[in-house]
Image (cartoon, grey):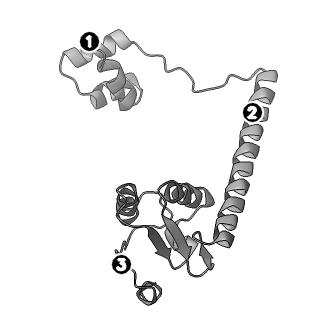
Amino acid sequence: MREYAAQRGFDIIEYRDEGVSGAKDRRPGLDRLMRDAKAHKFDLVIVARFDRFARSTAHLLRALDEFQQRGIDFVSLSENIDTSTAVGKMIFTVLSAVAELERNLIRERVAMGIARAKKQGKTLGRPERIFDRAHARSLAGNGLSARAIAKQLGVSHTLIAQTIRHL
């Protein structure tokens, strides 16, 4: 990558994530790169391979779309894709179309599954957590922590925190 950039006379800003799983959408180096893209600190991103940048097609396409909106080109050396070229733009367009098709198919499957479940009379959504909210608020008013109240009432401390936040 450095050689590619040097041959073309590009200034280099390096972003790295060492010791952080590449499977995560959020990584310190990647987050900094995306912030700098929004601030227009560069006009080209060079990666060795797609899978070193993004581990899912959806994540890759979100990033490429963001770059495209900001006029930032993207080069993947291993896959020989450069969005500053006509062929690179075409490949990006095809990838985007495939991702959109995948999203629509998932949406259709989910809708069909929900319709089937309703037809079968199944109850959808999370079950309602039934507990004495007034008692929880009273215990909180007496100084008990959300965790202690949750343990006593047999519900999650998050649910208790949400309940007592509205005192």
In the figure, 103 relative to 31: above or below?
above
Image quadrant where one finds the C terminus: top left
- Number of the front mark, 3 or 2: 3
Q: Is residue 95 left or right of residue 26?
A: right
Mark 2: which amino acid?
A: Ala
Residue 109 x/y as whole percent? 77, 40
Q: Position of residue 52 (x, y in %)?
A: 51, 73
- Residue drawn 48% across and 63% down? 72
Front tag of 3 and 1: 3
Q: Left of 136 or right of it: where is 68?
A: right
Q: Residue at x 49, y 21 (%)?
A: 129
The amino acid on which the numbered mark 1 sits, given as a three-letter code, is: Ser
Q: Quick one: SS at disc 3?
A: loop
Look at the picture and state if 167 lies above or below 110. above
Residue of label 1: 138
Residue annotated with mark 2: 111
Secondary structure state at the residue bearing disc 2: helix
Residue extending farthest left:
143
Query: Horizontal and vertical percent for residue 155?
Result: 42, 27
Q: How many numbered marks appear?
A: 3
Q: Judging from the image, what secondary structure is the residue with disc 1 in?
A: helix
Residue 134 in view in this figure: yes
Which residue is at the front of the view, 43 or 51?
Answer: 43
Q: Residue at x 52, y 79 (%)?
A: 48
Residue 12 badge: 3
